[in-house]
Image (cartoon, rainbow, N blue to C red):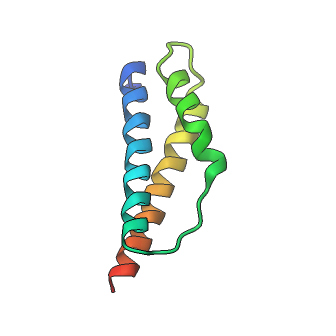
Amino acid sequence: MRAIKPVKRRRLIDRGIATVHAQQELLRLNGTTFALQPGFMSDMPTLARLAGQEDAVDVLVSAGMLMLAGEIMRLRILHQAGRE
């Protein structure tokens, strides 16, 4: 199994953060009410910095990526439900 290089890990997390923020803004503009999950989102920039280091803990980086993916999916579902 090939590991993702640190620079790509950081870029993926940064893109995930940007996607979450864009989806939240879209929901706000559409007037959709949604619960924020500020705890883990406030930690994501720190995780992105850690992910960019060679000695980053893979399990921690992976868990953060999964959390971002889950939040992106949650917000996408809320957006779709708001359009119906």
Relative image position of residue 9 (x, y in whole percent): 42, 28
Outermost residue on the bottom side: it is 84
Task: Write the residue at 50% across / 56% down.
Answer: 70
The answer to whether residue 58 is seen in the rendering is: yes
Outermost residue on the top side: it is 54
Task: Write the residue at 32% across / 81% down.
Answer: 83
Seen in the picture, residue 14 relative to 25 is either above or below; the reply is above
Task: Write the residue at 41% across / 35% down.
Answer: 14
Outermost residue on the left side: it is 83
Camera-side residue of 45 and 67? 45
The answer to whether residue 1 is seen in the rendering is: no
Relative image position of residue 27 (x, y in whole percent): 41, 67
Is 46 displayed left or right of 68 in the figure?
right
Q: Quadrant of the C terminus?
A: bottom left
Task: Write the residue at 43% across / 61% down.
Answer: 73
Seen in the picture, residue 10 relative to 65 is either above or below; the reply is above
Is 43 displayed left or right of 49 in the figure?
right
Quarter of the image for residue 37 reads bottom right
Q: Quadrant of the N terminus?
A: top left
Camera-side residue of 9 and 80? 80
Relative image position of residue 59 (x, y in whole percent): 59, 33
Outermost residue on the right side: it is 39
